[in-house]
Image (cartoon, helix red, strand yellow):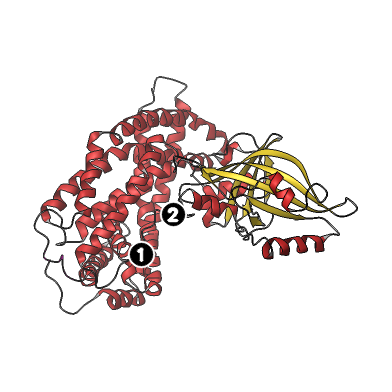
Amino acid sequence: MNDSTVSGFLLPHSMNAERLAKLLGGDAQCWIDESVDFTLDFFDSFDWRLHAAGQRLLQLRTPLGAVVRLKPSGGGGPTDVIEFNDQPAWPADLPDGALKAKLAKLLEMRVLLSVVSLRGEATDLRILNEDAKTVVRLQLLRMQCVSADIDEPRVLLPRLRLLPVRGYERHLNRLAAHLADEMEWPKAPDCLFDEAVAAVGREAGDYTSKLNVRLKRDQTALQATRKVLLSLLDTLERNVAGTCADLDSEFLHDLRVATRRTRSVLSQVKRVLPDELVTEYKERFAWLGQITGPTRDLDVFLLELPRYRASLPASMAGDLDGLEQHLRAAHRTEQAKLKSKLESAEMRSLLDDWHAVLEADDPPGEPGSFAELPIEQVVSQRIWRMYKKVLKDGRAVSADGPAEEMHELRKDCKKLRYLIEFFRGLYPAKELKELIRTLKELLDNLGEFQDLEVQADKLRTFAQDFDPEDPHSMPTVMAIGALVADLLRHQQAAHERFADCFAGFDSVQNRARYKRLFKAEGGLQE
């Protein structure tokens, strides 16, 4: 067993090596060699980053040892093969080489997880000619799939691989034709990965944090809004377990984004859901945002540490060791608190109650006055009004103005972007592409400005946690001071770039796009 792309034929469940050899001519023409037990594990990140990049990561274990391979999903040889007995998790744990470097680039901050495992037996057979020479090599694979997603293993149909022997290619072709035409055995799927994933009830790429809800223009505002909110709830729930287990930082990030987007829908899609319901769940999801904040803040600093070290003179990089120890200790404390709260009755009640609201025939309470209007009419007006607000406030921001102007503008830009992303399926994709690009560039600038300020303020707070009387703390405090100065310089540079970023958003062409897509004659009274 040496390849994740297995060509050949699918055989009946009852087929074993002895029956197969007998069908192919008995001992005189088909010789059974040794059998080997194996496991084949496929790995990817929770959000399928390797699959999205057209790659498959697998680990093959036999009695002789274990190897890890990274292969293109479309076929072809592995980019690198390494001997590695532990289960792959973080690229940093792998030996230096092409595989490690490529995985680190593709995965970034995400951990590898087992997608599906195959447990099986591989039996080698040989087809002999009249001179007892081997003319075709065969491999019979009997396998079952196991996964955390299923209770019982899924048994795959046995498959037969036909392997050529140099100089005897015509024998292989003749045997393949016989198996297909006379035995009527179906060809095996080209990709064992896809077959195994399907066997455990999954589909590659079945999770993404990106919101892409299919909507129809004539759907009512209530129908479309509930569909968006159910999609966000699914994303939120799928990230709870990984957040509690602290598998990687992106589980909590995606959970928080889904929470923030939920509150944004409740706030921005006005007069659709009952007012009392909106008020209640804005508060309840605000609680979820609050309890997840401290751990996420520490995640961000731990992710930024390599960049922080690189920004300092080489002689000072090690002075941040004390800060790293402080951050990791604080993270352990906050992570334990967060896990307790996410597993609490309050959290379970929030999710259960929200499911009940969104899945009910009619939401409890008096529906909003826009509930039965076409969603496109309701959302277009809301996007247009938010766009006009961003335009007005952005034009008032000055290069030397207070930071609060930038922060408030960022909040409104995020609301605008969320509205567009929630309901992007209602509008032409080509028109939205450039519109979203200019908005993203503006948001990146505003986000950089605010993030740098927040990081600088928080680092000052961290510095105060070190004992000024302890001489061992002085290098760490000085290194933090150097970081703060560097962050504030970059923040000032981001402020100075704002005018150019906003000019792209406020261009004649972009204004025309917003007007064409979202402005309607008349309007609804909010």
Expressed as whole percent of the image width and height from the top left, the position of residue 448 reads 39, 52
Q: Is residue 485 left or right of residue 133?
A: left
Tell me what residue is drawn at x 50 percent, y 50 percent: 199
Q: Is residue 133 left or right of residue 511?
A: right
Expressed as whole percent of the image width and height from the top left, the position of residue 258 reads 32, 50
Who comes first in sequence, dot 1 or dot 2? 2
Expressed as whole percent of the image width and height from the top left, the position of residue 268 reads 21, 59
Tell me the residue that label 2 is attached to. 206
Quadrant (top left, top right, bottom left, bottom right) of the N terminus: top right
Q: Which residues are magenta?
A: 369-373
Of the pair 67 and 122, the residue shown nearer to us: 122
Q: Is residue 104 left or right of residue 388?
A: right
Quadrant (top left, top right, bottom left, bottom right) of the C terminus: bottom left
Of the pair 91 and 442, the residue shown nearer to us: 91
Residue 439: mark:
1
Residue 401: mark:
none
Q: Quadrant of residue 18?
A: top right
